[in-house]
Image: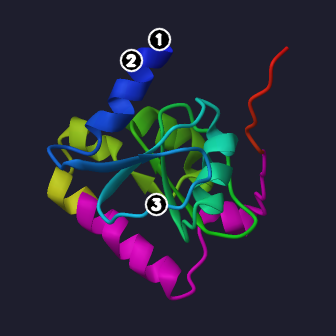
């Protein structure tokens, strides 16, 4: 898989929703709706950029199981497959792999994610918070 394919996959997660704005790394959006941030492929750097832009909570989908958290906001980790979830369950909040496995639906997993977002907004801890993950990395561009 290439970085281009990964980027298209990220945009595809927005479904048929109109992209309202594309912002620079760490830039606060001026519009509401689906906003795309020009960032890097590095997980922690992207989370830091989202937080710098004003994000209060991150829903982080992972197919590799990156154990990542943040200092200033909850990070809800969602596994894209059940094999990964079974190996890294202590680090991952939600297993979306049940959709592919036929044990859950897009609607039921969507509701589970929504419920977790609401619970975290009301003070529940994510697994990253419980485990003490507090990663932080700033993306910058420079001429070499």
Q: Secondary structure at mark 2?
A: helix
Residue at 64% across / 69% down in the picture? 73
Can you tell which of label 2 and label 3 is closer to the viewer? 3
Counting other residues with Cα less than 10 Å from the Cα at mark 1, is it few (<14), some (14-19), or many (20 or more)? Answer: few
Farthest-out residue, right: 144
Q: Secondary structure at mark 3?
A: loop
Say above or below: 37 vs 132.
Answer: above
- Residue underneath mark 3: 29
Magenta: main secondary structure: helix
Magenta residues, as a range?
A: 110-137
Q: Secondary structure at mark 1?
A: loop
Residue at 58% across / 29% down in the picture? 41
Answer with the quarter of the image where residue 34 lies. Answer: bottom left
- Residue underneath mark 2: 5
Say above or below: 126 vs 142.
Answer: below
Q: How many marks?
A: 3
Residue at 43% across / 17% down in the picture? 4
Reading the chain from its start, which is encountered first: label 2 or label 3?
A: 2
Counting other residues with Cα less than 10 Å from the Cα at mark 2, is it few (<14), some (14-19), or many (20 or more)? Answer: few
Say above or below: 10 vs 134.
Answer: above
User: Which dot marks residue 2?
Assistant: 1
- Residue 113 colored magenta? yes
Query: Which x, y percent locates residue 97?
Result: 33, 41
Reading the chain from its start, which is encountered first: label 3 or label 1?
A: 1
């Amino acid at each position: 898989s290439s970085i281009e394919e990964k980027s298209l996959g990220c945009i595809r997660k927005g479904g048929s929703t109109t992209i309202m704005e594309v912002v620079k790394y760490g830039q606060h959006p001026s519009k509401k709706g689906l906003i795309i941030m020009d960032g890097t492929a590095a997980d922690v750097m992207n989370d830091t950029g989202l937080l710098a832009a004003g994000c209060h909570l991150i829903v982080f989908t992972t197919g590799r199981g990156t154990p990542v958290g943040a200092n200033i906001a909850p990070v809800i980790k969602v596994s894209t497959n059940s094999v990964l979830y079974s190996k890294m369950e202590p680090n991952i909040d939600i297993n979306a792999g049940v959709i592919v496995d036929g044990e859950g639906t897009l609607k039921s997993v969507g509701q589970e994610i929504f419920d977790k977002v609401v619970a975290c907004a009301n003070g529940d801890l994510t697994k990253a918070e419980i485990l003490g993950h507090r990663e932080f990395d700033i993306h910058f561009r420079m001429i070499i």
